[in-house]
């Protein structure tokens, strides 16, 4: 009887698996049918059929790329529209000739999807994961069935007081800008930055509190105009309850990140005004910093310890004081610490003091970098920490240990097999360090 039940259960599970595979197969069949061939061949086919070429630039390690491929490209509505209007192609942007193709279309992150005219000119380039509605909107604009960026800009010029048109224009701006080149790109950046600032001023403070305007702020605010960014974070902070009610904790994190960057930049420049930003942690931005959720230490205590130590190191080159302050910082942070905290502490030693570091300082840097390494899984960060440790051992004239860590770093780069350009650059730098080591040993 037990055996019979087992067999029935096994049959049931197998049937479920078959049904699931069949369902997945149906979804894939109803989704986008991607052309099997090279970019050049796809472009020829697009010309022959007088269609636009849709290209999904992906990387094999990119999780959002895989999610889009599985959950967006397979949807029936998406497949029906794309199969009718486009020749679609998926390109591993870090493999072979695809590297240069991706560079030509200014692909700098993944996923990136591009709509390309049959003559090879980019119509729009969209960076970042998109849901079904976002992808369909981009597709309809490319196909001429939705209002394009240029059409919206003409509407804006006809009536520069229409805030709805301005919002649509600014939402489309990032993908439009990515498709521009040379002087055209510079010209549009200047225009859109002016438009963006006027738009924010016209809607501030309360009419900006919505998902679309928050997305505009995230993509167009930038870090170049610090005065305007300060204006934006103060604007959010003054109405933080309303922002968080509408958008959750994201606006608070935006304020925290921006204020921390201001404080860090000032401290590294040796500008005592960094203290003004530290004081905001417990005063003006106290509510925003509550989202950080520290245990055993307040956000203000954390900020004061860290930025005071950083200022002292960069301004006064006081390595001993920095090491002592950071050890206190690590002790008070305890369970709040991440691997990056140790790695960043070591890196600041190298950047601020460089060749003036003494043997005992290198020993501290090694200790911190090893702690970072023991907790870090990301390949690029692991390579960085290994090279840092190797550099310190080289300065300590322990060439055996230096070679050991350089070789470990090189071996770690082999895990970047699908990231050809970063892998080649890292391996070249490590080989150079190994060559220098050979000269030192002679």
Image (cartoon, helix red, strand yellow):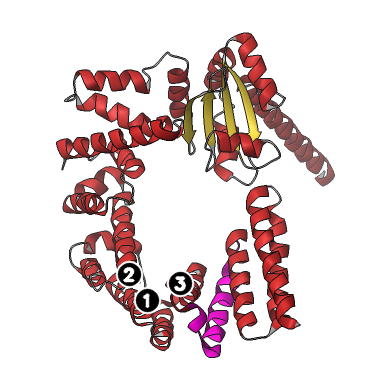
Magenta range: 354-378
The mark found on residue 314 in the picture is: 1
Q: Residue at x 35, y 21 (%)?
A: 150
User: Furthest-top residue in view?
Assistant: 49
Q: Secondary structure at mark 3?
A: loop
Quarter of the image where the N terminus is located = top right
Q: x, y percentage for residue 405?
A: 68, 74
Marks 2, 3: nearer the viewer: 2
Q: Are marks 1 and 3 in contact (CB under 8 Å)?
A: no
Name the residue carrying label 2: 269
Instruction: Work out how far the residue at label 1 is from the one at label 3, CA to CA, in angstroms.
Output: 23 Å
Label 2: how many Cα within 10 Å (few below 14, some 14–19, many 20+): some
Q: Secondary structure at mark 1?
A: helix
Label 3: how many Cα within 10 Å (few below 14, some 14–19, many 20+): some
Is 359 magenta? The answer is yes
Q: Residue at x 35, y 70 (%)?
A: 268
Q: x, y percentage for residue 109?
A: 52, 43
Instruction: Work out how far the residue at label 1 is from the one at label 2, CA to CA, in angstroms.
Output: 7 Å
Classify residue 266 by image quadrant.
bottom left
Q: Earlier in the sequence, mark 1 or mark 2?
A: 2
Nearer to the camera, 73 or 106 = 106
Q: x, y percentage for residue 135?
A: 47, 27
Classify residue 283 by image quadrant.
bottom left
Nearer to the camera, 276 or 191 = 191
Q: Secondary structure at mark 2?
A: loop
Name the residue carrying label 3: 337
| Residue 82 visible, this orientation | yes
Is 104 magenta? The answer is no
Nearer to the camera, 435 or 386 = 435
């Amino acid at each position: 009887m037990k055996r019979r039940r087992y067999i029935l259960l096994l049959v049931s599970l197998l049937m479920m698996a078959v049904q699931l595979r069949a369902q997945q197969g149906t979804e894939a069949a109803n989704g986008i049918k991607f052309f099997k061939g090279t970019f050049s061949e796809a472009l020829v086919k697009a010309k022959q059929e007088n269609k636009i070429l849709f290209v999904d630039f992906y990387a094999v390690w990119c999780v959002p790329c895989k999610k889009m491929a599985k959950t967006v490209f397979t949807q029936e509505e998406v497949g029906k529209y794309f199969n009718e209007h486009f020749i679609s192609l998926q390109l591993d942007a870090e493999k072979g000739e695809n590297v240069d193709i991706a560079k030509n279309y200014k692909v700098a992150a993944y996923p990136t999807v591009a709509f390309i005219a049959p003559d090879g000119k980019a119509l729009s380039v969209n960076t970042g994961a998109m849901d079904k509605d976002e992808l369909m909107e981009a597709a309809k604009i490319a196909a001429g069935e939705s209002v394009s960026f240029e059409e919206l800009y003409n509407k804006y010029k006809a009536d520069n007081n229409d805030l709805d048109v301005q919002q649509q224009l600014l939402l489309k701006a990032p993908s439009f800008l990515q498709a521009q080149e040379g002087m055209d790109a510079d010209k549009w950046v200047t225009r859109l930055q002016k438009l963006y600032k006027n738009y924010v001023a016209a809607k501030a403070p309360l009419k900006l509190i919505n998902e679309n305007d928050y997305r505009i702020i995230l993509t167009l605010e930038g870090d170049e105009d610090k005065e305007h960014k300060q204006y934006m974070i103060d604007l959010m902070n003054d109405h933080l309850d309303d922002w968080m009610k509408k958008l959750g904790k994201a606006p608070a994190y935006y304020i925290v990140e921006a204020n921390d960057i201001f404080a860090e930049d000032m401290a590294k420049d040796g500008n005592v005004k960094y203290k003004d930003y530290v004081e905001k942690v417990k005063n003006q931005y106290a509510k925003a910093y509550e989202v950080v959720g520290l245990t055993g230490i307040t956000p203000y205590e954390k900020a004061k310890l860290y930025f005071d130590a950083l200022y002292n190191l960069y301004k006064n080159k006081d390595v001993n004081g920095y090491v002592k302050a950071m050890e206190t910082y690590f002790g008070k942070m305890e369970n709040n610490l991440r691997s990056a905290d140790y790695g960043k502490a070591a890196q600041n030693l190298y950047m601020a003091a460089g060749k003036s570091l003494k043997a005992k300082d290198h020993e501290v840097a090694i200790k911190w970098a090893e702690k970072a390494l023991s907790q870090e899984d990301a390949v690029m960060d692991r390579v960085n920490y290994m090279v840092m440790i190797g550099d310190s051992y080289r300065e300590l004239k322990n060439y055996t240990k230096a070679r050991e860590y350089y070789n470990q770093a090189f071996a770690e780069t082999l895990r970047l097999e699908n990231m050809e350009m970063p892998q080649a650059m890292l391996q070249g730098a490590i080989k150079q360090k190994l060559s220098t080591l050979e000269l030192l040993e002679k």
